[in-house]
Image (tube, coloured by chain):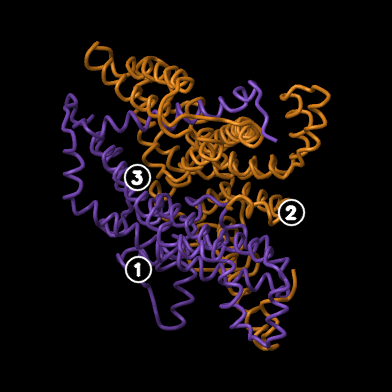
Chain colours: A orange, B purple
């Protein structure tokens, strides 16, 4: 890093640039300051018009938070726990299995026939229709049968010398990452349909811990695989080769050498995933209704429930925001700026 | 270098299985649903209509207006994010005074829940009690209809999007700027190139690949916009700020029109694929020339 970029500028233009950045910084920080301040105001303090400085303009109070804890505006405490439990477990599972997949894609060679993918698609689609329409099974039974059959057929088809292109590791990686491009409404709605079909068989997936966590794991995997691949690629292969000479099995190389060496990356990925799950709104909106409601849903509901009670709304928003503020502080310390750059190449 | 060991299947299958079961398989199911006329309320037994749902949707003005609104928000917001983000990144890279302090503050918005951000925005934009109203009333602009007028509401949503996602652009561009080689700039110094010439001659072209990627990511993400609009305006006034995702939500979850909504979500998928492919096709010649 150097002073380049501004070197050709005069002293005055440098100051102008600094002022510009400062202005943007103020725009960024002011709304945050505003929530924090408003959360400590009393109702008359809010309705009386904007006030800015605690103790000078108004007397701060903890009442909004006490109300929140006592559950006057919805069961905040339980929802907070829901968000925490689902967020932590989904992030942990996604990081674990995503890191494994990323490692496999970096170090092992995979070959998937495009034909096998087509077999999966056609059998999943056709099998479902066949079972449902011809054999008279219910929709959910047909679905549950079609999936394993299509999967097994695809695995078998991959061994057969089918015509058509063979996909390598890069293509599999692209397949993972492209999941992220899908508009989530497509999958959220589809998942809602699927979950309710399975629900009719007796496995409650809508508004359940398992259903929600599973869904978040699936939708965090693209980011995890994407980020972790870069970390694993940066690890010098010599260490692993030395271990292989000593006949250390692959899974011990992974757990004993690779994981400790990329701890920073794993931690950063875990935190990014956690932030994603914590803030996620659409899936939670479709897949929960009361028991496993998450914080964003409850926060969004504050608006319409009781009108413009800004002191309470601020406190609610603050509860959703503060954990992520702490994370931002932690992340910015950990994050070498190269981290995300590697990810977008 | 590449090993071949049967254990690789143990490594990759959990992830593949989860994605197949939770994200690909439902898609296939919802594809079949999109060819049905299938409603829960009032309950009508499903009937195969093939492309009927798609045809109805393409004639539905509300679909086109949602597509237009989403496109408008995405393009304007991403354009502003890119311009501001690139500018701030350049300034931070040139070590303006106090740069360290800025970094944490600038990263914050993108980690916050869009729902909470939208609530805060509602407070800021409140036409009577909000601080923005007080600020503007000093210039004689009192009680502007921030969220109750279609155009104003769109502008407010775009402003919130810019506020929240410019940090992402800053972060990426900053990381990119730090990888640029030093010697090119030294050569330019010797030639007495001005800062302006250096930017357009060196920095901008060399940052083009990263810029393309950043804009692509933001554009795709912006098309998914839902939570912000849901909280700020609920799609209103009328349907002036209704985005595609919100439209699908209204149809699917308020009217339980399952076949129709499935068709809508697939049209959305097709639209976003077309936009993505067109974008990449338009940029490819520029990107390859620089390599």
Distance CA(mark 2)–CA(mark 3): 37 Å
- Which residue is painted at 68% across and 81% down in the image? B188
Along the line of sight, which residue is nearer the eye, B150 or A109?
A109
Distance CA(mark 3)–CA(mark 1): 29 Å
Residue A288 seen anywhere in this rendered image of the structure? no
Q: Is residue B96 left or right of residue B220?
A: right
Along the line of sight, which residue is nearer the eye, A46 or B96?
B96
The reply to whether discs 1 and 2 touch (Cβ–Cβ < 8 Å) is no
Callouts 1 and 2 in the same chain: no
Mark drawn on residue A190: none
Q: Is residue A341 above or below residue A245?
A: below
For mark 2, what is the residue?
A333
For mark 1, what is the residue?
B152
Which is closer to the viewer, label 1 or label 2?
Answer: 2
Badge 3: residue crowd in 10 Å (few <14, some 14–19, many ≥20): some
Q: Mark 1 — on which chain does it sit?
A: B
Q: Where is residue A323 drawn, in percent x and y?
A: 63, 46
Along the line of sight, which residue is nearer the eye, A270 or A285?
A270
The reply to whether discs 2 and 3 touch (Cβ–Cβ < 8 Å) is no
Mark nearer the N terminus (3 vs 1)? 1
Dot 2: element = helix
For residue A8, which quarter of the picture?
bottom right
Q: Where is residue B15 drawn, in percent x and y?
A: 55, 29
Quarter of the figure with the N terminus of chain B: top right
- Which residue is painted at 67% across and 60% down in the image? B104
Q: Where is residue B36 drawn, in percent x and y?
A: 21, 31
Q: Is residue B27 above or below residue A299?
A: above
Mark drawn on residue B269: 3
Q: Is residue A200 above or below residue A191?
A: above
Badge 1: residue crowd in 10 Å (few <14, some 14–19, many ≥20): some
Q: Where is residue B227 drawn, in percent x and y?
A: 42, 49
Dot 1: element = helix
């Amino acid at each position: 890093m150097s002073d380049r970029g501004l070197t050709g500028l005069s002293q005055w233009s440098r100051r102008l640039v600094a002022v510009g950045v400062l202005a943007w910084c103020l725009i960024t920080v002011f709304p945050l300051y505003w929530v924090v301040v408003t959360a400590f105001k009393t109702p008359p303090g809010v309705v009386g018009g904007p006030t800015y400085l605690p103790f000078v303009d108004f007397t701060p109070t903890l009442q909004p938070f006490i109300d929140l804890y006592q559950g006057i505006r919805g069961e905040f405490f339980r929802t907070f726990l829901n968000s925490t439990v689902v967020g932590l477990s989904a992030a942990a599972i996604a990081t674990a299995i995503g890191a494994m997949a990323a490692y496999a894609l970096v170090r092992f060679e995979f070959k998937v026939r495009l034909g096998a993918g087509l077999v999966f698609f056609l059998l999943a689609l056709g099998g479902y229709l066949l079972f449902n329409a011809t054999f008279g099974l219910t929709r959910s039974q047909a679905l549950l049968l079609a999936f394993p059959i299509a999967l097994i057929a695809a695995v078998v088809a991959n061994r057969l010398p089918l015509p058509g292109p063979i996909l390598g590791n890069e293509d599999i990686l692209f397949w993972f990452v492209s999941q992220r491009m899908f508009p989530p409404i497509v999958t959220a709605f589809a998942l809602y349909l699927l979950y309710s079909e399975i629900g009719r068989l007796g496995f409650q997936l809508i508004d359940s811990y398992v259903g929600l966590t599973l869904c978040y794991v699936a939708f965090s995997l693209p980011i995890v695989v994407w980020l972790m691949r870069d970390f694993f690629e940066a690890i010098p292969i010599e260490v692993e080769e030395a271990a292989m000479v000593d006949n250390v099995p692959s899974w011990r190389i992974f757990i004993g050498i690779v994981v400790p060496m990329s701890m920073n990356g794993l931690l950063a990925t875990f935190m990014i995933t956690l932030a994603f799950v914590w803030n996620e709104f659409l899936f939670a909106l479709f897949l929960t209704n009361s028991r496993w409601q998450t914080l964003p849903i409850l926060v969004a509901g504050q608006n319409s429930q009781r009108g413009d009670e800004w002191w309470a709304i601020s406190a609610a928003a603050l509860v959703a925001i503060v954990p992520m503020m702490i994370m931002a502080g932690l992340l910015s310390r950990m994050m070498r700026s190269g981290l995300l750059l590697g990810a977008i190449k | 270098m590449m090993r071949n060991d049967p254990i690789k299947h143990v490594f990759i299958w959990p992830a593949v299985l989860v994605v197949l079961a939770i994200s690909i398989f439902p898609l296939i199911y919802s594809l079949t649903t999109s060819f049905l006329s299938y409603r829960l309320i009032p309950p009508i037994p499903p009937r195969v209509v093939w492309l009927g749902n798609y045809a109805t949707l393409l004639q539905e003005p509300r679909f086109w207006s949602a597509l237009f609104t989403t496109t408008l928000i995405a393009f304007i917001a991403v354009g502003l994010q890119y311009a501001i983000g690139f500018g701030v990144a350049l300034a931070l890279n040139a070590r303006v005074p106090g740069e360290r302090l800025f970094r944490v503050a600038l990263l914050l918005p993108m980690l916050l829940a869009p729902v909470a951000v939208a609530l805060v925005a509602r407070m800021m934009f409140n036409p009577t009690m909000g601080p923005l109203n007080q600020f503007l009333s000093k210039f004689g602009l009192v009680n502007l209809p921030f969220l109750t007028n279609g155009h104003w509401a769109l502008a407010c949503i775009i402003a919130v999007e810019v506020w929240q996602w410019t940090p992402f652009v800053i972060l990426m561009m900053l990381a990119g700027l730090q990888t640029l080689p030093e010697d090119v700039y030294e050569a330019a110094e010797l030639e007495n190139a001005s800062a302006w010439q250096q930017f357009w001659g060196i920095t901008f072209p060399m940052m083009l690949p990263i810029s393309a990627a950043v804009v692509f990511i933001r554009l795709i993400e912006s098309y998914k916009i839902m939570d912000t609009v849901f909280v700020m305006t609920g799609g209103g006034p009328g349907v002036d700020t209704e985005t595609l995702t919100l439209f699908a939500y209204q149809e699917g979850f308020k009217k339980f029109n399952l076949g129709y909504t499935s068709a809508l979500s697939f049209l959305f998928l097709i639209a976003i694929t077309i936009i993505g492919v067109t974008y990449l096709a338009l940029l490819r010649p520029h990107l390859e020339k620089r390599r």
